[in-house]
Amino acid sequence: MATTLKSAAKIVATPITKPLSAVYRRAVIAQRFALPDVASQVEAAQAAGTDIAAASTRQYFDLQLKLLPYRVTKLKEEIDCLAGEGSSLSNYTYKNWIIFVRFAVRVVFLFMVGTMVGRQSVYPSLLPDSVFAVELERKYRSARAAVAAPPPQTQQAAH
């Protein structure tokens, strides 16, 4: 019983542990070849008993908070540029218009694909009074009735 339980656990755990082991091996190798400053920071954190991942995350968010005023001023400059003379449509060249049209076509295409995937249908939406909607409703009812119907029962001889 114990051996079958162990073999069953091994069968279940192997698909999970093999990829994790491969990731672990790559991480160990990458840590050996890490840049000297990163390696020294990791060793200093291990010696101090601190978590380097938590410290680096905290440092990242502190830097982003310090950059917020710069980003606000940069946004204002870009809005001023859009509202000013720098972006007049008369200044656009032939190449700019081609790039704009390509971008617009991609946006429309992605919208259409997203709509089809979201609706799970390539067919256009139907109005309730459409001729096609009536036929679709009839087919849907008959298919739903076939699924909801109980299976036929077989006659068994009484013994």
Image: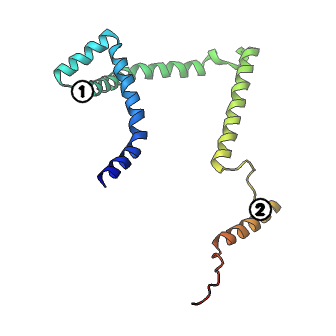
Label 1: state its secondary structure: loop
Total number of numbered discs in the rendering: 2
Q: Quadrant of residue 114?
A: top right
Amino acid type, mark 2: Ala
> In front of the other: label 1 or label 2?
1
Pointer 2: what residue?
133
Q: Residue furthest right?
A: 131
Q: Residue furthest bottom?
A: 159
The image position of residue 119, as x and y in percent, is 65, 50
Q: What is the CA distance from the residue labelled 1 to the residue labelled 2?
A: 62 Å
Foreground pick, 83 / 125: 125
Q: Residue at x 72, y 65 (%)?
A: 140
Label 2: state its secondary structure: helix
Q: Quadrant of the C terminus?
A: bottom right
Amino acid type, mark 1: Asp
The image's mark for residue 51 is 1
